[in-house]
Amino acid sequence: MTEFYTEPAKQVPIVGSYDVVVAGGGTGGVFAALAAARTGAKTALIEWKGYTGGTAVEGGTALHSFFNLYKAFPDAPKKQLIKGIPQELIERLYAAGGTAGHCEMDQYYDYDSVCTTIDTEIYKRVSLDMLVDSGVTLYLNTMVVDAIRDGDRLTGVIVQSRSGREVVHSRAFVDATGYGDLSAYAGARFTEPNDYPVVNSMGVGGVSVEKFRDFLIANGGLGQLAHGRRSGKEGQIIRLGGYGEQFPEAFRTTAKEIGLSCVTTTLWDDYFMFLKLNLMLPVSPTDRDAVTNAEIELRRRMSKGIELLREHVPGCENAFIARTSPQITIRRARCIACDYDITIDDVLDAHRFDDEVMLYGFMDLAPRLQVKDGGWYGVPYRALCVSGVDNLYATGMMLTSDHDAHMSTRNTVSCMGHGQAAGTAAALIAECKTDSRSLRYDDLRQALLRGGVVLE
């Protein structure tokens, strides 16, 4: 039987009042906050780590994907589907040496036509600079711990930091927490499918990118390959993917046991930017004890992964861990009930909607499942509107109950697009003093087009 303690009531200081509050400064939250601020809203971004970027800088290998799958379909046009603020970030990263840009895949391009690799640390700095430049108020090292609701509307969030427990008021809200924390606190309906492994990724130094390629070729396992700018030199390997059916048995067996994915990207000589270790949890990653055990196990797996590279891969004899994510990264936790649930048929049939807020064409199950004819589908505005709450939007990996559809919508560049759309919409309903379902789509569409979003 669970025992309880009754907290004494106390007054909590109100530390800010905004037009838009974005909970979560991850892959989508950065763009939601930027979009809201640039649409004219007084905006605050609440992030419980000391930096922004989320999965893009912690759990990915490359950003998927700004383009349609044109290389796999000779008759498909090449179309950049995600522009706007996400493309601005790429341009600023490129100027800072934090990306090789949009580089075409040389092999395995029936999975993705383009590789957009980033430097994790430069991404953090550039995204923070963009937020500050746009006038977003940042609450870093601050966690959303509850929501204040009046009828069908949110009026504020309760946050916790080393400054104590505080209240932030707002007219409109975007849940970009990844876990769906704000939506859950607000009383929204959700499920917890627990249908993906969690991951921690490590950056590995003291390696040879070219010898790793040779190892993959020698063992019949070279899949993904792309070239671009690395350490200031053009035409270098920036992405490698290995598939291990023919790898040495000891390597293959251990890699499977520890969930090691032999896919990496890099912008620097002698460095793998990302190597991922996967682990399937018995329960949802909202479970504290399960996540604690996972954190411990994944760091043990990292050590085994380094030993595996040193033993079996030429050029990796002196490999060492140079970077890890501060905590596990998820692919899904809570799935938030929204006004529309995107289906796999919507994705694969390249379905278009009369209220769409972005276009997207990447599918993480390719080449087994691909968007028809290398095309793209629309994401409807309704898919961002949290059911039962009038001024709350959900973004990113919280959308779409259909697992296979989610294999498209959860990806990093998709989350960026969701973020810009949700932030723009939140700013408009705050300005018009209306609710998410009364917002005129034509007004939203024009604001998105002004923000550089591709809708045709």
Image (spheres, rainbow, N blue to C red):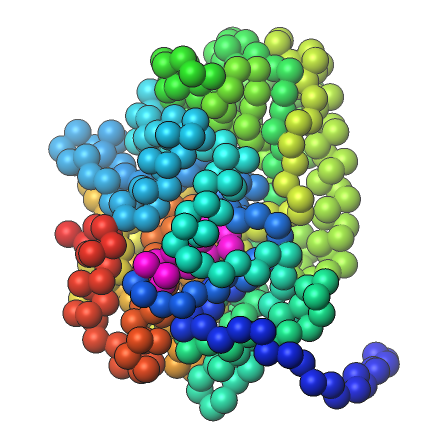
Along the line of sight, which residue is nearer the eye, 402 or 293? Answer: 293
Residue furthest to the bottom:
151
Along the horizontal axis of the image, is 81 left or right of 105?
left
- At x 35%, y 76%, the residue is 430
Magenta range: 25-38
Asked if residue 26 is among those painted magenta in the image, a careful observer would answer: yes
The percent coordinates of residue 350 (x first, y second) are 23, 52
Along the line of sight, which residue is nearer the eye, 337 or 137? Answer: 137
Asked if residue 75 is among those painted magenta in the image, a careful observer would answer: no
Query: In this view of the protein, can residue 318 be seen by the observer?
Result: yes
Along the line of sight, which residue is nearer the eye, 153 or 382? Answer: 153
The percent coordinates of residue 102 (x first, y second) are 32, 30
Query: In this view of the protein, can residue 277 be seen by the observer?
Result: no
Quadrant of the snapshot with the N terminus: bottom right
Q: What type of secondary structure mainly makes up the magenta span?
A: helix
Give the quarter of the image for residue 31: bottom left
How many discs appear?
0
Figure check: 246 above or below 18: above
The percent coordinates of residue 198 (x first, y second) are 61, 47
- At x 79%, y 87%, the residue is 8
- At x 61%, y 9%, the residue is 315
- At x 68%, y 18%, the residue is 319
Figure check: 227 above or below 166: above
Along the horizontal axis of the image, is 407 left or right of 121?
left
The percent coordinates of residue 182 (x first, y second) are 54, 70
Figure check: 54 above or below 286: above
